Image (cartoon, grey):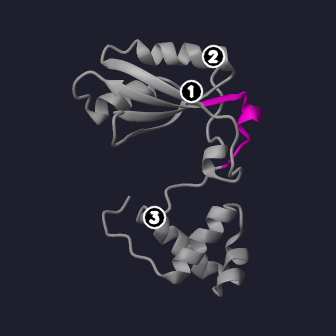
Amino acid sequence: MNSRAASFDDLDRKIITALMANARSSFAEIGAAVGLSATAVKRRVDRLRETGVITGFTATVKPSALGWRTEAYVEVYCEGAAPPRRLAEVVSNHPEITAAMTVTGGADALLHVRARDVEHFEEVLERIRAEPFIRKTISVMVLSHLLPESPEAGATQAAPE
């Protein structure tokens, strides 16, 4: 990734919007929508990738098709100060954790967990709680997605073995 500051204009924003709606759109299709040639769109997309504005392309998959039938958010509370890099090491060892972030408020981190079923989720939760610096967790199970087209409603990785 280039260290230059990423600058982009309204045409770049339109291109990004088109790619976010459908990353499989051709440069010609995007060009027709934004008023540029396919070549000009490709140059802009290449620049946006080089500068780190566009970080990649992915497919959104229905989680249940991959075996993810249970979903929860888990607040993690740590003993003392757990540095974010230590938390990152821990969560990277759990393939069921699809997103993790440090947060403000009472909890130290928030985890998005997907599992095959409730029993699998409980096993994941026990593995997380076994970490020596984890004091407690609070879980909230997802019942349904009110915005089914949101990225949180999809999955970007395969179900655990």
| Residue type beneath disc 2 | His
Q: In the rendered image, which quarter is residue 155 located in?
A: top right
Name the residue that disc number 3 marks. Answer: 53
Between discs 2 and 3, the one toward the N terminus: 3
> Residue placed at 65% from the left, 87% from the top?
35
In magenta, the rendered stretch is 59-71
Q: Is residue 25 visible?
A: yes
Q: Which residue is mark 2?
A: 120
Q: Is residue 85 above or below residue 122?
A: below
* Mark 1 surroundings within 10 Å by alpha-carbon count, few (fewer than 14), some (14 through 19), many (20 or more): many
Q: Nearer the viewer, residue 108 or 132?
A: 108
Element type at marker 2?
helix
Can you identify the residue that label 1 sits on? 96
Q: Nearer the viewer, residue 80 or 14?
A: 80
Q: Mark 1 and 2 residues: CB-CB less than 8 Å, in contact?
A: yes
Secondary-structure class at tag 3: loop
Q: Amino acid at mark 3?
A: Val
Horizontally, residue 67 falls left or right of residue 88, namely right
Residue 30, how many percent across, how many down?
68, 75
The disc, 1 or 2, on the residue closer to the chain's N-terminal end is 1
Which tag is nearer the camera, tag 3 or tag 1? Answer: 1
- Residue lying farthest to the front in this orientation: 106
Q: Quadrant of the C terminus?
A: top right
Q: CA distance from mark 3 to mark 1?
A: 27 Å
Residue 39, picture quadrant: bottom right
Question: Can you tell which mark lies on residue 128?
Answer: none
Labels in figure, total: 3
